[in-house]
Amino acid sequence: MQNPPQILVKTWLQLLQSDLEHEAKKEVENKIVKAFGSIEIAIIYLQEKASA
C-alpha cells in the first residue's frame, strides 16, 4: 500500500493538535492509524521524508 501524500499527513497531525471536537479528532486519528498503524509511525514517516 502506498503512503498518503506528505502534505496530507502533515495536515492530519496538525488537526490532532488543533481545537477540533473530540469526534473529529478521532476520525483523523483513525485515518492515520489506517494508513500507518500508529501516529508515531506517521511522525517518523514525515521525519524521514524531511531528511531525504
Image (tube, rainbow, N blue to C red):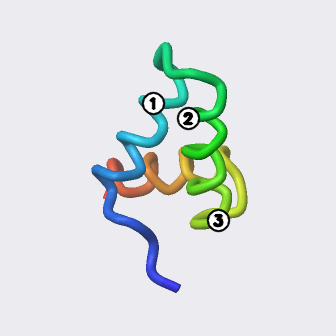
Helix, strand or loop status at disc 1: helix
User: Nearer the N terminus, badge 3 or badge 2?
Assistant: 2
Quickly name the residue at label 2: 24
Q: Quadrant of the C terminus?
A: bottom left
Mark nearer the viewer, 2 or 1:
2
On screen, residue 46 above or below 1:
above
Dot 2 alpha-carbon crowd within 10 angstroms: few under 14, some 14 to 19, many 20 or more: few
User: Nearer the N terminus, badge 3 or badge 1?
Assistant: 1
Instruction: Tell me where residue 3 appears, x and y as whole percent.
Output: 45, 72
Dot 1 alpha-carbon crowd within 10 angstroms: few under 14, some 14 to 19, many 20 or more: some
**Gap in angstroms between the C-alphas marked 3 and 2:** 15 Å
Helix, strand or loop status at disc 3: helix
Asked if the residue under mark 1 is in contact with the one under mark 2, i.e. CB atoms within 8 Å, the reply is: yes
Quickly name the residue at label 1: 15
**Gap in angstroms between the C-alphas marked 3 and 1:** 16 Å
Residue under the point 66% across and 39% down: 26
In this view, the residue in front, 23 or 39, is 23
Instruction: Tell me where residue 2 appears, x and y as whole percent.
Output: 45, 81
Quickly name the residue at label 3: 34
**Gap in angstroms between the C-alphas marked 2 and 1:** 9 Å
